[in-house]
Image: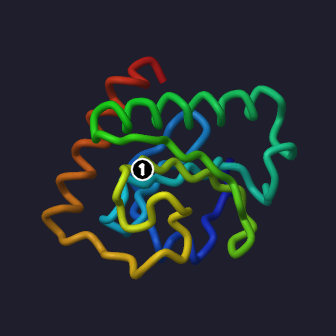
Amino acid sequence: MSDFSLHPRLEADTYHVTDLALCQVRLMNDARFPWVILVPRRAAIREVYELEESEQARLWQEATMLGRGMQETLGGDKLNLATLGNLVAQLHLHVIVRRQGDDAWPGPVWGAGTPRPYSREALEEINDRLLALIASIFDDD
């Protein structure tokens, strides 16, 4: 794990929240959507199949557990999980809580409208909520 480094675009577009057993949890700087990105802390990984089988399972577990918790606590109508990597090849999994009537509904969030950066206060609030949620879900990690 010591060779892991974050792609500069992910660094620029997100805020570090915490680290899970496999992934770094990063909040996308777009307050329109409850949206985190999970980045496996492994060097030079571009595709899910490049992870060890146990790590593939762990990635899915972290994404689904966090997504469910986000949807339940932050409120949402649909959970979107996606790995695209067309602009940033480094493997990262988007966990996005969607609400009917949000700025992109029912389409994808990518390229929809103009991102609305978090204010300092809103960033602190969502970060605290995410940390509390993560602590309640992953209490044994």
Where is residue 138? Give x, y as percent. 43, 25
Where is residue 55? Give x, y as percent. 73, 33
The kind of residue on which mark 1 rests is: Arg
Where is residue 129? Give x, y as percent. 24, 42
Which residue is tagged 1? 98
Residue at (72%, 28%) from the top-left corner? 57
129 over 30 or under it: above or below? above
Left or right side of 49 for 86: left
> Based on the displayed image, in which of its 4 quarters is residue 16 positioned?
bottom left
Of 131 and 119, the residue lying toward us? 119
Within 10 Å of disc 1 (Cα), the crowding (few <14, some 14-19, many 20+) is many
> Based on the displayed image, in which of its 4 quarters is residue 56 positioned?
top right
Residue at the far left: name it: 121
Left or right side of 31 for 45: right
Instruction: Give the color scheme: rainbow, by chain, secondary structure or one colour.
Output: rainbow
Residue at the far bottom: name it: 114
8 over 57 or under it: above or below? below
Residue at the far right: name it: 49
Q: Disc 1 on helix, strand or loop?
A: strand
124 over 89 or under it: above or below? above
